[in-house]
Image (cartoon, rainbow, N blue to C red):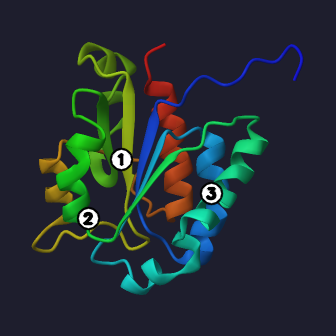
């Protein structure tokens, strides 16, 4: 790779409610290609628990899928991967994995703030140099008791709207990661 520099270390992190295994297999290379430092795969009330028994969630398979995306991006930095079927348990560990003062935490939801309300300067002025985005399951985060949106909010996540349309997980993930890249301070 003469004359080409390696991509900078990723400063984006993704908390993803685990989609159907086939969809996850398609998404993993895209996630790696977008440049993610940490991939947190979790359960949610609308995530089928059977997904966590799939071979796709075994580390060797996850790493192979992620490596495909890294190769396309000409990168070698493998994301740290955490698989936790229980969202509440993952959120209780989140401050240890990625402290609140380190990353701006955003969750995609139609009722959230518009992009212009979450300016790049906001992340800088709060002293945060990284972004963690949370993407819910295909049917969205639960708003029933206990509300997953409330749990995410209690964990420091701000809602961010991508518009009123309901988006598939893969579309929301790619879009939020691209927007997160633009929000990062240089």
In the image as oriented, which residue stretches furthest toward the right?
2
Spatial distance from mark 1 to mark 2, Cα to Cα?
Answer: 21 Å
Give the residue displayed 50% in from the left and 26% down from the top.
182
Give the residue displayed 86% in from the left and 13% down from the top.
3
* Residue for badge 2: 87
Tell me whether the residue at label 2 lies in contact with that at label 3, contact meaning CB atoms closer than 8 angstroms: no
Foreground: 32 or 1?
1
Q: Residues within 10 Å of mark 1 (few under 14, many from 20)?
A: some
Q: For residue 149, what is the image quadrant?
A: bottom left
Q: Nearer the viewer, mark 1 or mark 2?
A: 2
Residue 157 seen in the figure = no
In primary-sequence order, the first of circles 1 and 2 is 2
* Residue for badge 3: 63
Q: Is residue 118 above or below residue 171?
A: above
Give the residue displayed 32% in from the left and 29% down from the top.
118
In primary-sequence order, the first of circles 2 and 3 is 3
* Residue for badge 1: 161
Q: Position of residue 84 (x, y in %)?
A: 34, 65
Tell me whether the residue at label 1 lies in contact with that at label 2, contact meaning CB atoms closer than 8 angstroms: no
Q: Position of residue 11 (x, y in %)?
A: 47, 30
The local secondary structure at tag 2 comes to helix
Residue 76 seen in the figure = yes
Determine whether, in the image, residue 122 is placed left or right of residue 10: left
Q: Is residue 78 above or below residue 131?
A: below
């Amino acid at each position: 790779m003469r004359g080409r520099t390696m991509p900078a270390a990723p400063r984006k992190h993704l908390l993803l409610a685990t989609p159907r295994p086939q969809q996850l297999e398609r998404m993993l290379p895209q996630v790696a290609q977008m440049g993610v430092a940490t991939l947190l795969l979790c359960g949610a009330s609308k995530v089928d628990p059977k997904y966590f028994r799939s071979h796709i969630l075994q580390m060797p398979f996850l790493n192979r899928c992620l490596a495909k995306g890294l190769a396309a991006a000409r990168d070698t930095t493998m994301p740290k991967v955490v698989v936790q079927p229980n969202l509440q348990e993952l959120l209780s560990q989140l401050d240890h994995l990625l402290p609140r003062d380190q990353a701006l935490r955003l969750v995609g939801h139609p009722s959230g703030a518009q992009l212009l309300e979450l300016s790049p300067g906001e992340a800088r002025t709060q002293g945060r140099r990284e972004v963690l985005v949370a993407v819910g399951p295909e049917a969205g985060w639960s708003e029933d008791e206990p509300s997953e949106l409330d749990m995410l909010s209690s964990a420091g996540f701000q809602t961010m709207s991508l518009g009123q349309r309901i988006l598939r997980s893969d579309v929301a993930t790619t879009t939020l990661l691209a927007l997160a890249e633009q929000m990062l301070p240089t």
